[in-house]
Amino acid sequence: MNEYFDAFEIGPTSQRGADASAPEVFRGIYAMPAFVTVPTSDLAVSTDFWLRGLGFVELFTVPGQVVHLRRWAYQDVLLVPATEPLPAEAPATTVSFSCVLSQIDEVAAACAGLVPGCVRGPRDTPWLTRDVEVITPERVRVVFTAPKEFDPDSEEARDLAAAGITAPREEVRDNDVDGRE
């Protein structure tokens, strides 16, 4: 049996729509619960693309070994030297990062300016996000995904409700993180 609870209020993208603001880059050190390791044939070129195109910051570098990049908390990427030639085509794996709507066009324009033809989208999804896909110089498919404004009377909301995903509550209680009273 599946049990779902309303958890829209947790996480940095609980604010939806055009007026949502992005959280600050988190520069603290923590044990990363998940991260992406990206092999690259040129650490400098890759670092520049991820910084200027995708909006990451360089948290730290061990020269010639690893560049640790981050956006928000728990959005970590480790660039490492490739030990074998990179594939000519983009891999089947895609990594997605949350953002806010105002960042979608910024990321698309910045990446297209750095590597023309590397951007697809933006496009709207049936699950109420706007996504832009970028193929990085290392041939990684990166999707930035932003939640759109939620209209509880929309067709998308009805489709989500039919799948058992209900609209977020209007009012959020401080100690109600897991959805239980």
Image (cartoon, helix red, strand yellow):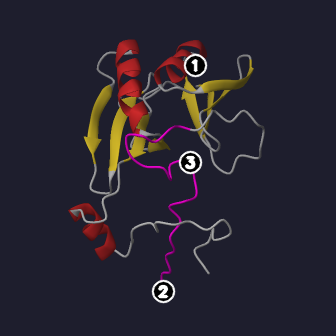
Which secondary structure, mark 1?
Answer: helix
Residue 35 occupies which quadrant of the picture? top right
Q: Which residues are magenta?
A: 1-22
Contact? badges 3 and 2 (CB < 8 Å)? no
Q: Identify which residue, 121 or 105, lies in the foreground.
A: 105
Q: Residues within 10 Å of mark 2 (few under 14, many from 20)?
A: few
**Residue 108, can we see it?**
yes
Q: Identify which residue, 125 or 101, lies in the foreground.
A: 101
Report the residue marked by disc 3: 12
Residue 91 occupies which quadrant of the picture? top left
Q: CA distance from mark 1 to mark 3?
A: 24 Å
Contact? badges 1 and 3 (CB < 8 Å)? no
Report the residue marked by disc 2: 1
Residue 8 within the segment the image draws in magenta: yes
**Residue under the image location 41 percent in, 26 percent down:** 107
Name the dominant secondary structure of the magenta segment. loop
